[in-house]
Amino acid sequence: MRRHREGHQVRHIGWLRAAVLGANDGIVSTASLIVGVAAAAATKNDVLLAGIAGLVAGAMSMAAGEYVSVSSQSDTEKADLKRETAELRANPAAEEDELAGIYIARGLDKHLAQQVARALTKKDALAAHARDELGISEITAARPIQAAFASALTFSIGAALPLLAVVVTPAPAVVTAVALSSLVYLALLGAVGAKIGGADIVTATIRVTFWGALAMAVTAGIGLLIGKAV
C-alpha cells in the first residue's frame, strides 16, 4: 500500500486546550484586575502589585485546577479500562459480538463487521474496545501533568503582557494602554490558537476578543463605582 503523511490538527488537542485557556485567562484576568484597580484611582505601584499578585495566584490556581480536573478524567478512563479488562476476561465472545455491533451501527454489513471485530480482538482486544466503545485513544487520553504545566506556563506569559504595559506606560494612561494592548494580545491569541487547531481564524479571533473586552469593561465599571464610593 502507498502511504502518505497527514497532518491532522486533532493531535494537538491535549495541550492546545489547556494552553489557550491558560493564556486567555492570564490576559483577561490580569488585565481586568489592573483596569479595575486603576479605575478605582489606585497608584501605579498599587496597580503593579495587584497585577503581580494576580499573576502568581492565577498561575498556581490554573495549574492546580487543570491537574485536578484532568486527573478526574484520567481516573474515570482508568476505571473504565479496568472494567473493560474484566469483561473481556469473563466473556470474550460477548465482547467480540459487542464490538461487531458497533461496526454494524457504523455501516458495515454483519459478516464484515464480525471479521473486523475478530481481527482487532486478536491483535489487541482492550485497545479496540477502548477506542471504539469507550472513545479513549492515545490522542484524547487525559494527561494531567501536561495540562497543568501548559496552563500555568501560558497563564504566566499571558498575565505578564498587561503587566508590561503598566511598567512602560505613564500612570494616567495605564487603563487605556492595558485595555488596548490586551485586546491586541487576545486577538493574536485567538488567531494563533485557530491556526494551530485548523479552525476559522476570524471567528476565533472575534470570540476571544469580545469576551476579553466584556470582562475588562465590567471590571472597570466596578472599579469606578468603588473608587467613587471610597
Image: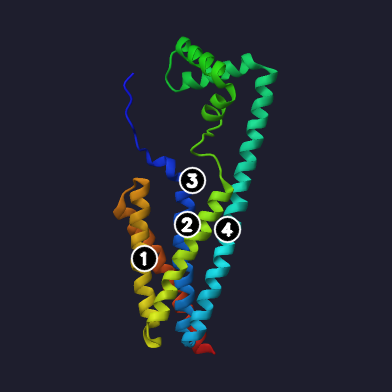
Identify the amino acid type marked 4.
Ala
Give the percent coordinates (x, y) of residue 68: 62, 52
24 over 141 or under it: above or below: below
* Quadrant into which the C terminus falls: bottom right
- Of tags 4 and 2, the one toward the viewer is 4
Helix, strand or loop at label 1? It is: helix
Mark 4–mark 2 Cα distance, whole angstroms, equals: 11 Å
Residue identifier under label 1: 185
Identify the amino acid type marked 1.
Tyr
Is the C-beta separation of discs 3 and 1 under 8 Å? no
Give the percent coordinates (x, y) of residue 20: 44, 55
Identify the residue shown where x is 56% and y is 29%. Answer: 130
Is the C-beta separation of discs 4 and 2 under 8 Å? no
Of pointers 3 and 1, the one earlier in the residue sequence: 3
206 over 93 or under it: above or below: below
Helix, strand or loop at label 4? It is: helix
Mark 1–mark 4 Cα distance, whole angstroms, equals: 22 Å
Mark 3–mark 2 Cα distance, whole angstroms, equals: 12 Å
Residue identifier under label 3: 14
Mark 3–mark 1 Cα distance, whole angstroms, equals: 23 Å
Mark 4–mark 3 Cα distance, whole angstroms, equals: 15 Å
Coloured how? rainbow
Residue 110 vs residue 196, the one in the foreground: 196
Helix, strand or loop at label 2? It is: helix
Of pointers 1 and 4, the one earlier in the residue sequence: 4
Give the percent coordinates (x, y) of residue 133: 55, 28
Residue identifier under label 2: 21
Is the C-beta separation of discs 1 and 2 under 8 Å? no
Residue identifier under label 4: 63
Q: Is residue 105 left or right of residue 191?
A: right
Of pointers 4 and 3, the one earlier in the residue sequence: 3
Helix, strand or loop at label 3? It is: helix
